[in-house]
Amino acid sequence: MKKIVTICFVIALNLMIQNPCFAIKIGLQTAVKETGIGASTEAVIIDANTNKSICSLDAMKGYEIRPYRNKIAIKYNGKYYKIDSDNVVLKTEKEGFVSAKNKWYRGDLLIQNKEGRLTVINNVNIEDYIKGVVPSEMPSGWETEALKAQTIAARSFALANLGKRSKFGYDLNDTTEDQVYGGASAETYKTNQIVEDTKGLVLIYDLKIIPAYYSASAGGQTINSSDVWGSELPFIRSVPSYDDDVKKNGHGVGMSQHGANNLAKQGYNAYQILQYFYKNVKFARINPEYYH
C-alpha cells in the first residue's frame, strides 16, 4: 500500500436536525412482557404525557415494571402499583446512571406501554452514546488510531441514521442490526478519552453526513454497496481491506475493523484510514452549540 498523504480540512457543520441538542434514542427492549429498572442515585419516575412526577425510587435498588391494561405497573416493596400513564421517564435526581437489561446507562430511560408490551428506550446525548458504542464494536486494546477511526465512523453512522427505527419510537437499536451499544457498563477510560478527543467529528460527502458502514472484516477485499443492498453509494468503493489474516465477518461494505487496526499498526492515522475506506469524503465538526 502506498503511503497516503492526507490534508485534513475540518469544517464547521450546522445541521438542520429536529433535535438540536443531539440526544439520540436507543431501543434497548421492544415488545417485552416485563423489565427491570433502577438507578445508581435517587431517581424519579415522570409521566411523559404531563411532565408530572409520579414516584421516587431509591438508589441501587431494582424495580420490576410490567404493562397493566393500557397503563404501567411497578413492583414496589413486593406489591404492584398502577402508574396512571402509558409513557414514563426514569431520571436520576443528580448525576448518575440508570439501569436496564442489567447494565448501566447514561441519560434517561423511557418506558412505554405499546399494545400491552413494553418498549424501553435510552434517551442519551450523542457523545455519551458513542462512548458505549466504541468499546462494544471494537476491542479497547486495539490501536488508538483504529479506535479513533471507529469513533468517527460510529458517530457518522448514528447521525446519518437518526429516525431509522422511528416506527418503534426510537432512532437505532443496540444490536448489530445498527450498532452494538453496551451503555456506560461497556465504557473504558481509553475509549472515553478518544471520544472526547474527536468530539463532534463526522465524515461528510456533498455536505451531508454519511452512514459510515463498517464490518469486522471483509476477507481481503471490501464490497461495493450495490453488491449487498442493490444501491450504489458514491463514497463506497471496493478496495483491498488489509484483513487477510482473518476470515470475512459481516457485510464487507465500508471500513474493515480488522483492516483499520492492521493499517494503524503500520503507522497510518485515523484520518488516513477513513479516507482509504471511504472515498472522496471530508471531515466536519458538528457546531458545538448543539451540544448540552
Image (cartoon, rainbow, N blue to C red):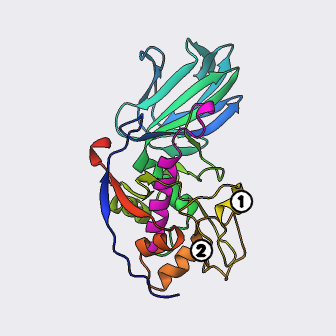
- Magenta span: 144-169
Q: Nearer the viewer, residue 210 or 173?
A: 210
Position of residue 20 relative to residue 175, above or below, is above
Answer with left or right where residue 33 lies relative to residue 172: right
Position of residue 86 relative to residue 268, above or below, is above
Mark 2 or 1, which is nearer the eye? 1
- Which residue does the numbered mark 1 point to in the structure image? 228
Identified at 70% across, 76% down, the residue is 219
Q: Amino acid at mark 2?
A: His
Residue farthest to the bottom, as pictured: 2
Q: Quadrant of the C terminus?
A: top left
Q: Report the disc number at residue 258.
A: 2
Q: Amino acid at mark 1?
A: Val
User: Where does residue 164 sit, x and y in percent of width and height?
Assistant: 58, 40
User: Where does residue 193 sit, x and y in percent of width and height?
Assistant: 37, 62
Any part of residue 62 in sight: no
- Neighbourhood count class around disc 2 (C-alpha, 10 Å): few under 14, some 14–19, many 20 upward: many
User: Where does residue 249 sit, x and y in percent of width and height?
Assistant: 70, 68
Circle 2 SS class: helix
- Neighbourhood count class around disc 1 (C-alpha, 10 Å): few under 14, some 14–19, many 20 upward: few
Image quarter for residue 204? bottom left
Identified at 61% across, 34% down, the residue is 36
Any part of residue 53 in sight: yes
* Magenta region includes residue 94: no
Give the CA separation, mark 2 to mark 1: 20 Å
* Magenta region includes residue 149: yes
Position of residue 251 relative to residue 101, above or below, is below
Q: Nearer the viewer, residue 263 or 203?
A: 203
Identified at 67% across, 72% down, the residue is 218
User: Where does residue 197 sit, x and y in percent of width and height?
Assistant: 33, 62
Circle 1 SS class: helix
Q: Report the disc number at residue 92.
A: none
